[in-house]
Image: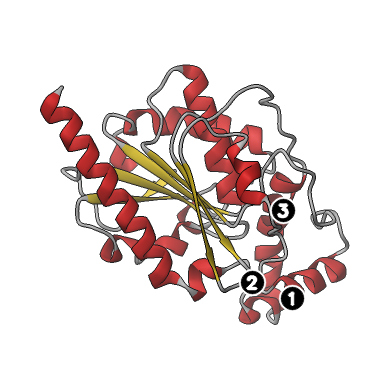
Amino acid sequence: MSAYKNPWFQLRSPAPNAALRLFCFPYAGGSASVFHDWPELLSHDVEVIAVQYPGRGYRFGEPLIASCANMVAAMVPSIVPWLSKPYAFFGHSNGGLLSFELALTLQRMGHPGPVHHFISGKSPVHLPRRRKPLHNLTEEAFIHELRNLGGTPREFIDDPELMRLFLPILRADFALGETYSYAWRGKRLKTAVSYLYGRQDESYAEGDEAAWSELIDGAVDSVGYDGGHFFIHSHKQDVIRYVDGKLRGCITAEKGRLRYA
């Protein structure tokens, strides 16, 4: 199967001649459509590849994966053919966890790592969880918590038929994050990282920037936004501007490396 026909990856604007690929990992309950307009907002020298998890979008009906380790293991064979040119990762919340685990797995396997890794809206994975588990709550309690979190559109929550379809996806995604256990003691991710966070996000705590640095063998930048957990929507233009600037720098550095190699 051609890489461009792989169900794991959605490309609204294929750019096989782009200098760099950006893989974007959605948050819990999200799909590749979260990043539908990023190709038009980023540099034309960046090929945006949105990750489509099983069970949503055009993969609706496929078995859901409720384990971070199983999701990464399922993704590895599909992503390896895409690593023939420089690439970067952007993951928000659950997507930050998955992209981090995937990057470490690829590193352990000897594959080239990302030239830059954007970890967004995700507390350091080796610290204790700050929120009670939600995935095993009763349906009524689970929906109540979804209302409080604010990330699920009201038209979904208020529509029983939509929620009947959507609840299993949300439960699986929450279980993926809530049952995760960090198992890379002594291993560090060898890449430059940008940690993005919302200053009003309840999952953020002072010191998270330094804690992420404990897991990274590379430069770690951090940037905060005056928003909650979904600042990537409320402050999309600022996030895009930051990501684009970092990626342009990576492309310039990579072209310079090739020129003088």
For label 3, the SS is: helix
Mark 1 or mark 3: name the one nearer the start of the chain: 1
Quadrant location of the C terminus in the rendered image? top left
Instruction: Verify CB contact (< 8 Å) between mark 1 and mark 2.
Output: yes
| Mark 2 nearby-residue class (10 Å; few <14, some 14–19, many ≥20) | some
- Residue 242, horizontal then vertical, whole percent: 38, 60
Mark 1 or mark 2: name the one nearer the start of the chain: 1
For label 2, the SS is: loop
Occupied quadrant, residue 147: bottom right
Residue 147 has which mark?
1
Q: How far apart are marks 2 and 3 (CA)?
A: 13 Å
Q: Give the labeled residue for mark 3.
A: 174
Residue at x 51%, y 75% (from the top left corner): 234
Camera-nearest residue between 204 and 143 = 204
The type of residue carrying mark 1 is Arg
- Residue 202, horizontal then vertical, whole percent: 72, 65
Residue at x 58%, y 68% (from the top left corner): 230
The type of residue carrying mark 2 is Thr
Quadrant location of the N terminus in the rendered image? top left
